[in-house]
Image: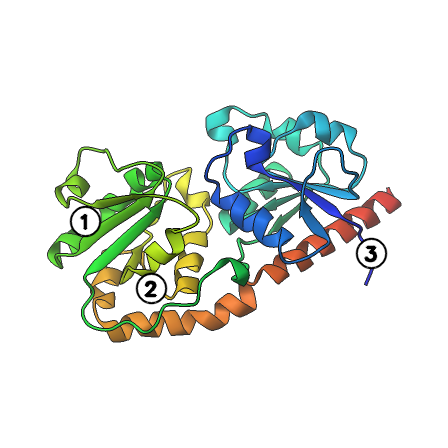
Amino acid sequence: MENIGITGMIPFVYFSGVQKLSGSTFIRVDGLAASDPRFEKWIHGKKYDNLIFQKAYWVEMMEMFDGPKILDICDPDWVNDQLDIIEISNLVDAITCSSEELTNLMKIYFPEKLVVHVPDRLNSIFFPQKREKHSGKAKNVTWFGFINNAHETLDQLLPAIKENNLNLRIIANEPYSKEDGVLDLNPEFIKYDQRYAYKQIQEADIVLNPRSDRAFFKYKSNNKTLISWKLGVPVAITNDDIIKLMDAKERNAQVLEKQEILEKEYNISKSAQQYYEIIKEIRRNKAIG
């Protein structure tokens, strides 16, 4: 196997200067660094053979570094932050994206650049043992993530939540404050803390992960669904899903069915291999050029 050296991953939380919750950094940087010695979280002053800029739009570093450079994009940040994505992306050798929709968008922007879908994948050492089998009729549902995303999506599932008299828990960075039907449910709020969040999610009978086709949300990855399956909790995207998953047999069947795909398609080792191949291709292209 060709030696690609050590790849430093510059995470969003470092570049932004704000040490806040970042699911993409936890999954795509911490998870990868803990799984493969060829990849590590960037250390200031250390020399690296390759760099991955994980949502880190650091123009000066991109210009200075001579080795293979990859920009890892997890959201269309330029829409809200007025980034010059064209200038930034032209400074790197390849772009990786966390969802197929985002990958397709970047391929339109950069038809001649190497753009690759590297899905969010999970490192098993970060997760507790999968929940034991579900039993009885579902009583408790949970939504987790950044609260702004709940404002755009959670309302969709109110009919089934209310119809089945389900208890709603929200695990997020802030309480739900939008004045609408969700507050009528008097949802329990727990502030997200990585140390406890997975155990708290496992207490749910169903995790809610409604989707939206609105511009920003359609580019998001499926990492919350993957995390829930890994924890042994089924996922409802629609009202019909909630109704189906009220039955414990259906909940157990979904969790069991998804374990094989988690291991085969969403094991973090596959991301390490993808990045290895991308870096090799970059080096080949540089040698030819």
Label 3's element?
A: loop
Q: Which secondary structure, mark 2?
A: loop
So how many labels did they put on this image?
Answer: 3
Instruction: Look at the image and tell me in which quarter the N terminus lies.
Output: bottom right
* Residue furthest front as drawn: 195
| Residue 243 position within the rendered picture, expressed as x and y whole percent measured from the top left | 20, 63
Residue for badge 3: 3
Residue type, numbered disc 2: Pro
Q: CA distance from mark 3 to mark 1?
A: 53 Å
Above or below 139: residue 31: above
The reply to whether the C-beta atoms of the residues labelled 3 and 1 are less than 8 Å apart is: no
> Based on the displayed image, in which of its 4 quarters is residue 13 positioned?
top right
Percent across and percent down for residue 266 are 53, 62
Q: Amino acid at mark 3?
A: Asn
Left-right relation of 222 to 267:
left
Classify residue 197 as left or right of residue 247. right
Q: In terms of sequence position, does the residue under pointer 2 or pointer 3 come before the other? A: 3
Taking the spot 70% from the left edge, 43% from the top edge, the residue there is 8
- Provide the residue designation for mark 1: 158
Q: Residue at x 68, y 40 (%)?
A: 42
- Please determine whether, in this image, residue 112 is positioned above or below residue 137: above
